[in-house]
Amino acid sequence: MIFDFDCTITNFHLSSSVTLEEISSRPLSEFIEAPLFKAFVEYLLRRGIQVAIASYGKKDIILGLMNRVFSNSIFDEDNVVTPRDISMEKNVKWSEGFNPSKRLLLNKNDMIQLLAHRLGLDLKEICLLDDTEEHIINARKLGCRAILVPKCEKFRQTLKTVLKHFLIPSEVELFMQDLDRPSSDHEESD
């Protein structure tokens, strides 16, 4: 499963609006619904599903936040791809935090293909979660499964959208009830 970062995992566009120092010092809940995201990623990993991030954002911000969410290195240099990786791979200039120049003919599919290569996956084995319709359309043309998730909503809404695509209806209902029930399991400590 490949996640977009800004506004898919996070509550807002972090890569262009916060520093690494702020990621380290501000309450985690300002940026992400960490307990839910962590639980979902761990659920995927227990089922043998590899996880990755493909983002136009800044790699240091992404890794900084993921290191706060996960005590181990689930997300690292290899399974987080940003414009920096594509720039090095294709010998082009694509600045982190920006859409690629039209003349480069690059898009999120370049990131997906690089991740598929790094993770040893066939494109049809990949599912992209993204809040941008263009990325979803392009990923489907590439042969990937792709799910459009709510833009800049809490991860809870993203998770509900994703679960509807993967679980049988009775499981979705039970999972939704669990998500909607106030519980200390879904609270975080900063």
Image: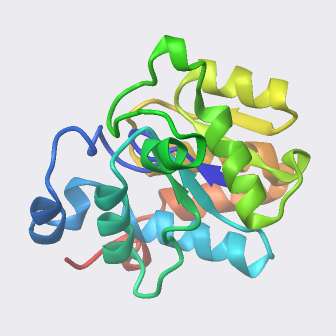
Percent position of residue 49, x then y: 77, 68
Looking at the image, the residue that sits furthest to the top is 102
Q: Quadrant of residue 71?
A: bottom left
Find residue 144 and report its horizontal and vertical position in percent: 82, 39
Nearest to the observer: residue 36 or residue 31: 31
In this view, which residue lies farthest toward the front?
Answer: 91
Q: Is residue 145 visible?
A: yes
Is the residue 74 above or below the residue 12 in the image?
below
Image coordinates of residue 76 in percent, x first then y, are 49, 72
Q: Which quadrant is the N terminus positioned in?
A: bottom right
Q: Quick check: 174 above or below 74?
A: above
Report x, y in % for residue 166: 80, 51
Q: Residue furthest bottom?
A: 72
Asked whether 68 or 32 is in front, the reply is: 68
- In this figure, which colouring scheme has been used for the structure? rainbow
Say left or right for 106 vs 67: right
Residue at 37% across / 66% down in the picture? 63
Depicted 88 relative to depicted 12: above or below = below
- Residue for point 77% across, 57% down: 117
Of the 4 image quadrants, the one containing the C terminus is bottom left
Does the image show residue 148? no
115 or 3, which is in the foreground?
115
- Residue sitting at 15 percent across and 48 percent down? 18
Number of numbered tags placed on the structure image: 0
Q: Residue at x 58, y 64 (%)?
A: 79
Quadrant assignment, res 130:
top right
Q: Is residue 85 left or right of residue 174?
A: left
Vertical side of 46 occupied by 115: above or below: above
